[in-house]
Image: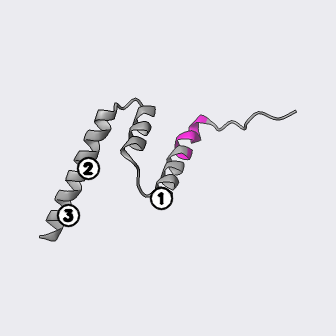
Amino acid sequence: MSQPDPRIPEDIADDVLEIASRLYSEANNSYSIQELQEAGKEVSIPPEFVEQAVREVKEKRRQAELEHQQ
């Protein structure tokens, strides 16, 4: 008889997912817009907001780079 999957206590689930997310990010170093939209969908973020956030982050980094060059 096989045993059921071990249960992870709720109080550590957030930490586990945070670390897993960081490890995955470090291993992949980039995401497609579709992958980001899928991740957003899992937490009820509409795709258009993910797209807007990508544009805003890119613009913010572009501005920071321009300021750094001056």
Circle 2: is it few (<14), some (14-19), or many (20+) Cα within 10 Å?
A: few
In this view of the protein, which residue sits in the foreground, 51 or 17? 51
- Occupied quadrant, residue 50: top left
Q: Residue pushed farthest bottom?
A: 70
Mark 3 belongs to which amino acid? Glu
Instruction: Tell me how the rendering is colored.
Output: one colour
Q: Amino acid at mark 2?
A: Val
Asked whether, in this view, residue 11 is left or right of residue 32, the answer is: right
Q: Is residue 37 left or right of residue 49?
A: right
Q: Between disc 3 and disc 1, whose residue precedes?
A: 1
Q: Are marks 2 and 3 in contact (CB under 8 Å)?
A: no
Front residue of this view, candidates 20 and 11 = 20
Helix, strand or loop for disc 2: helix
Q: Which residue occupies 58% across, 42% down?
A: 12
Q: Is residue 37 left or right of residue 65?
A: right
Secondary structure at badge 1 equals: helix
- Image coordinates for residue 34, horizontal then vertical, percent: 39, 41
Q: CA distance from mark 2 to mark 1?
A: 19 Å
Residue labelled with disc 1: 26
